[in-house]
Image (cartoon, grey):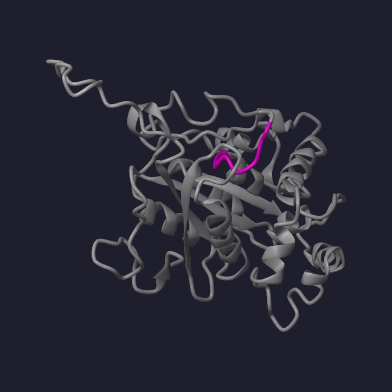
Amino acid sequence: MSKGDEQPLIPTPTPPPDASRAVRVAYVGCEGESTEVDHLNHLNDRYGDGSGYEGQRFHIQPVYKKNGYTLAEAVAAVRDEAAEDEAWALFDRDDHHDIPKTLREAAEGSTEVCFSHPSFELWLLLHFQEFGGRQSGKNKDVIKKLRQAHPAFKKFDGRNDKSIKDVRRTALDGSGTLKEAVSRAKRLVGQCEHGSCKAVNAKTYPYSRDNQPKSTTSWAARSGHAHDCETLRRDPSTDVWRLVVSLGIVEDSSRSAASRGHGYSAGPWGGPPVRSGPAIPAAAGAPGNRADPSRSTGH
């Protein structure tokens, strides 16, 4: 419009926020304080500026504490920290016995779950190679394969060093490795011994926490596993790929305009929860933050 043109009497409606400019915030509860947190921060640094496939800017807010959470504590902590915002929880099979209870509480609070059997390290390994075979909650073979998969991980978990920094970040950033990890994790869904599990049935769009909570079986089935596929029998498997795809980091054949979050009531304009500027939640302990003094949100 030129300077001489008349201004309209009724203001033009503000368009929906551009997904490439809005910042989507996802709180992610972690039972551990090192590996998972490092990886989430790496995703922030590498793709949070919108350089992922879908151009979505995002900030993952890790929620964790020194010496780690129990599974139930991790779900409760991220639920409290996120309040009405998007909440996820990462946890492993390991030797935990409270997984059914934790899944029920996650479903009641609409907290998305990224369950890994036997461990989160399986997700790291899938960046480099396929993996299969029942592990029965034991992590030994996964760690062995990971150490052999790339020189950067040769001493992983040696002297309790499970960090994901420096050369290990570089290794995970190799050409196509993240996309391959997603593809391999999805194939594990289809290889589940249940026989009816399909990654194409997984849900990767944000689920509004204002909606009615789903049943535990329906919530666990958002991973693509069948409703009657018992979570503890998903061996091996990892759902971390759903978080990566949900954030639009890699291209995925199952994604459409609808499944990216448009048309859902989770945020303004019916889209996913977004923030209109680059602001991110305050650091733990800062005024206005909901964290307790012993908890860190990853800054």
Residue 127 visible somewhere in the drawing? yes
Q: Nearer the viewer, residue 284 or 112?
A: 284
Residue 226 falls within the magenta-colored stretch = no
Q: How many marks?
A: 0
Q: Picture coordinates of residue 23 (x, y %)?
A: 41, 45
Query: What span is colored magenta in the figure?
Result: 246-252
Q: Nearer the viewer, residue 138 or 14?
A: 14
Pick the quarter of the image with the N terminus: top left
Q: Picture coordinates of residue 195 (x, y %)?
A: 81, 31
Picture layout, residue 215 above or below residue 291 = above
Q: Nearer the viewer, residue 14 or 219?
A: 14
Residue 250 falls within the magenta-colored stretch = yes
Picture layout, residue 70 above or below residue 248 = below
Magenta: main secondary structure equals loop
Q: Residue at x 35, y 57 (%)?
A: 281
Q: Residue at x 54, y 42 (%)?
A: 247
- Going by the picture, which residue comes out furthest to the bottom? 159
Q: Quadrant of residue 263?
A: top left
Q: Nearer the viewer, residue 17 or 292?
A: 17
Q: Picture coordinates of residue 262 (x, y %)?
A: 46, 26
Q: Picture coordinates of residue 150 (x, y %)?
A: 83, 65
Q: Residue at x 47, y 48 (%)?
A: 58
